[in-house]
Amino acid sequence: MLSKLLFVISSLALAGGTYLGFKNRQDFIATRNEKIEINSQQVKPTMAKIDETVTAIGAEIGKWKDAVASKKEKEVALTNAQSNLKAKNNDLEKIGNEIQEKQTELTTLEAKLAELLGNETIDTIQQKIDTLSQEIASLETDKENASKEYDVAKGKIDALEGTVASLRRASSERNKGISQNALEGTVIATNQDYGFAVVNIGQNRGLTGGSKLIVKRGGQRIGTLNVSSISANRTVADIEAGSVPAGMAISPGDTVILEKVQR
C-alpha cells in the first residue's frame, strides 16, 4: 500500500512538475514572441531606412558605373578625335606645302609670261587674236569666192583643153595626111604573070590597107597598084587591070606615091 501510495505521489509530483514545466515553457515562448514583436516594431523603421539607404547606394553605384562607362567612351572618342585631328593637321600641312609649290610655280610662269609678252598684255593679245580671227574669217570668205572663181575658170580651161585636144588631133591627122602625101617608095620586084608588085614602104611609113599607089617613071604615070598585104617595111600590091598603058610594064626601080591626097 505504501508503495502504491508513493507511486501515486510520485506520479502526481511528476505530472505537476511536467505541467509546471510546460506552463513555464509556454509563458517563456509567449514572452519571447512578445519581445520579438516589440523588437520587430522598433526595428522596422530602422530596416526601412537601411533598405532606403541600400537602394540609394545601389542607385549611386549605378550612376557611378554609368559615369565610368561614359568616361571610357568619352576617352575613346577623345582618342579617336585626337587621331583624326592629327591626320587632318598632316593633310592640312601637306596641302599647304602643295599650295606653296603651286604658288612658286605660278610665280615662275608669270615671270616667263611677262618675259615673253614684253610690253604686251593679255588684253592686247586678245585684241590681236580677235583681229586675226576676223582677218582669217575674211580670208576664208575670199578663199571660198576664189574657189568658186577657180571652178569657173577650171571649167573654161577644161573646155579649152578639150578644144585644144580636138585641134591637136585634127592637126595630127592633117600632119599624118601631109606625111602620107609626101610618102614615096620604090618598086623592088614585080610578077607580071600574077600581076603584083613589091614596094619598099610599109606600115612604118604610115601606109594602110586599101590604099592605092601611083607608079611613075620619069614623071610619067605608068600604072596603079592596089595594096593587098602590108608588113613593117614591105608592101605587096596588085597591079590594077587597065591602068598600065599598052607596050609598058611596071618594073623594079619605078617610083610609087599615094594616089589619094590626104588633107
Image (tube, rainbow, N blue to C red):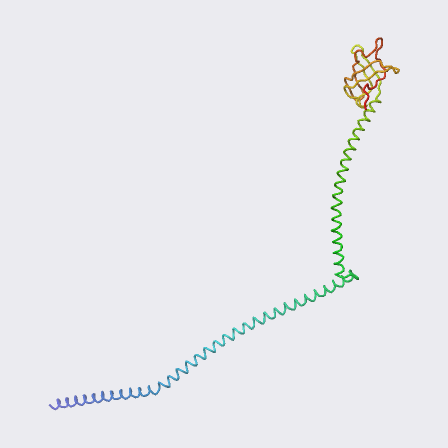
> x, y percentage for residue 185?
84, 19
**Which image quarter holds the N terminus?**
bottom left
User: Closest to the observer: 214 or 145?
Assistant: 145
User: Closest to the observer: 147 or 6?
Assistant: 147
Q: Could you tell me how many numbered marks the image carries?
A: 0
> x, y percentage for residue 222?
84, 13
Residue 208 drawn above or below residue 102: above
Q: In the orientation shown, which residue stands out farthest toward the right?
A: 218
**Which image quarter holds the C terminus?**
top right
Residue 228 drawn above or below residue 74: above
Asked where in the image residue 117 lies, by quadrant, the reply is bottom right
Residue 194 drawn above or below residue 231: above
Asked where in the image residue 238 lies, by quadrant, the reply is top right
Asked where in the image residue 34 lies, by quadrant, the reply is bottom left
User: Closest to the observer: 145 or 7?
Assistant: 145
> x, y percentage for residue 232?
79, 22
Residue 254 drawn above or below residue 37: above
Q: In the orientation shown, which residue stands out farthest toward the top?
A: 247
User: Closest to the observer: 80 or 229?
Assistant: 229
> x, y percentage for residue 105?
72, 63
